[in-house]
């Protein structure tokens, strides 16, 4: 017997989800038009994900021909950030990456999908993939409202959730699931609180300014946003941290995965490639190249250690001024100046790489 919406919701709650909704697996034409328009405007900054193939990511039928329903789930990952450990400069990690919350989400969605498969229906779990616009599905299923930060806000929970769906051809009878009314009202704290002004209008992000994207992007980190990066090495929570629904809610105590909230910067800079990937490999790292995390760590070190430059930090700068990667050397130049170690730049005095020369020529 096909499960009812309430049965599916009960399965999701039992598996640890904070919200479950069901909607039709119809295309999302308005979202497709928005994605294509923002891509044409360059606001995606080369980001792929759902921008890579909007025709697929906004049409569930491309993934499962004959699919009828999306069972959408939200997993609440909000935790209290633990106090930073002492002893060396630290880099900050966005809360969604402290542990693999998507693994927890997928496991919960599998608990919903499996009974449908046992009845002979097809059921595919989709989460953090370019096959589906997760937030569009969540909004349609009545999970939450679109915040001005572009995040989905779940009533009583907030926006610190990861979203995913079970796409199935089971003809689940739909009950009334009215879309959640806008709860932002006149609040603009996410726009005002963004360190780089990346939220250029309610619901519109310019990824070329967004720190959460820039730490994952390839190439040279834009010089105009290096100071704004602060101590971040992966992700940015600022628009969510200032959001009143997230602040009002009682934060849960730290759990076993909360040690991932901080990265010892010098440990990272002293690690070899395999050690970095073993520790941080589940993050999105361009081309699986640890040099991008070294780039981020050098900038974070420059921002947090200006008043406490130590011999160990100086040794890390020397190592990276001699690094095989010109991109790493270029960021080491910037970090050396910021840390008051410009005398070390003699190491790259004969460097011929264009990116390094640009850094050396900066005031």
Image: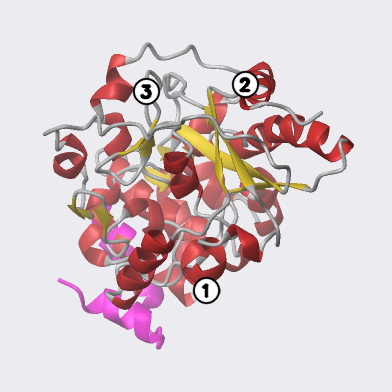
* Structural crowding at the residue carrying mark 1, measured as other residues with C-alpha within 10 Å and reported as few (<14), some (14–19) or many (≥20): few
Q: Earlier in the sequence, mark 3 or mark 2?
A: 2
Residue 251 seen in render: yes
Residue 207 x %, y %: 32, 61
| In-front residue for pair 203/205 | 203
Element at badge 2? helix
Q: Give the main secondary structure of the magenta stretch.
A: helix
- At x 43% / y 38%, what residue is drawn? 94
Q: Earlier in the sequence, mark 1 or mark 3?
A: 3
Q: Earlier in the sequence, mark 1 or mark 2?
A: 2
* Structural crowding at the residue carrying mark 3, measured as other residues with C-alpha within 10 Å and reported as few (<14), some (14–19) or many (≥20): some
Judge left or right: residue 221 versus residue 18. Answer: left
- At x 32% / y 24%, what residue is drawn? 246
What number is the disc on residue 6? 2
* Structural crowding at the residue carrying mark 2, measured as other residues with C-alpha within 10 Å and reported as few (<14), some (14–19) or many (≥20): few
Separation (CA) of disc 1 from disc 3: 47 Å
Segment colored magenta: 335-363
Element at badge 3? loop
| Residue holding disc 3 | 155
Q: Can you say which quadrant of the picture contains the N terminus?
A: top right
| Residue holding disc 1 | 325
Image depth: mark 1 or mark 3 in front: 3
Element at badge 1? loop
Residue 50 x %, y %: 50, 63
């Amino acid at each position: 017997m096909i499960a009812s919406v309430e049965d599916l919701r009960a399965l999701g709650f039992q598996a640890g989800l904070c919200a479950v909704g069901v909607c039709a697996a119809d295309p999302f034409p308005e979202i497709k038009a928005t994605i294509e328009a923002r891509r044409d405007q360059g606001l995606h900054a080369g980001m792929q994900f759902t921008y890579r193939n909007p025709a697929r990511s906004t049409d569930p039928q491309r993934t499962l021909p004959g699919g009828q329903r999306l069972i959408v789930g939200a997993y609440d990952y909000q935790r209290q950030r633990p106090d930073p450990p002492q002893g060396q400069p630290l880099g900050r990690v966005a809360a969604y990456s402290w542990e693999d919350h998507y693994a927890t989400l997928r496991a919960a969605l599998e608990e919903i999908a499996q009974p449908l498969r046992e009845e002979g229906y097809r059921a595919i779990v989709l989460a953090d993939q370019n096959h589906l616009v997760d937030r569009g599905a969540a909004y349609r299923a009545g999970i939450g409202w679109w915040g001005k930060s572009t995040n989905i806000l779940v009533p009583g929970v907030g926006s610190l959730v990861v979203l995913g769906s079970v796409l199935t051809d089971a003809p689940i009878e739909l009950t009334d699931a009215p879309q959640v009314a806008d709860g932002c009202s006149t609040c603009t704290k996410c726009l005002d609180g963004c360190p780089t002004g990346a939220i250029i209008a309610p619901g519109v992000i310019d990824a070329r300014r967004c720190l959460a994207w820039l730490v994952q992007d390839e190439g040279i980190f834009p010089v105009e946003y290096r100071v704004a990066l602060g101590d971040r090495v992966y992700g940015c929570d600022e628009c969510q941290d200032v959001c009143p629904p997230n602040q009002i809610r009682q934060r849960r105590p730290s759990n076993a995965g909360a040690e991932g909230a901080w990265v010892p910067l010098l440990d990272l800079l002293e690690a070899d490639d395999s050690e970095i990937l073993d520790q941080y490999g589940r993050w999105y790292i361009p081309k699986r190249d640890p040099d991008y995390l070294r780039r981020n760590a050098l900038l974070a070190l420059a921002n947090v250690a200006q008043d406490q430059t130590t011999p160990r930090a100086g040794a890390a700068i020397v190592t990276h001024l001699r690094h095989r990667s010109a991109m790493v050397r270029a960021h080491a130049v910037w970090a050396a100046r910021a840390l008051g170690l410009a005398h070390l730049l003699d190491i790259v005095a004969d460097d011929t790489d264009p990116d390094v020369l640009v850094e050396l020529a900066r005031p």
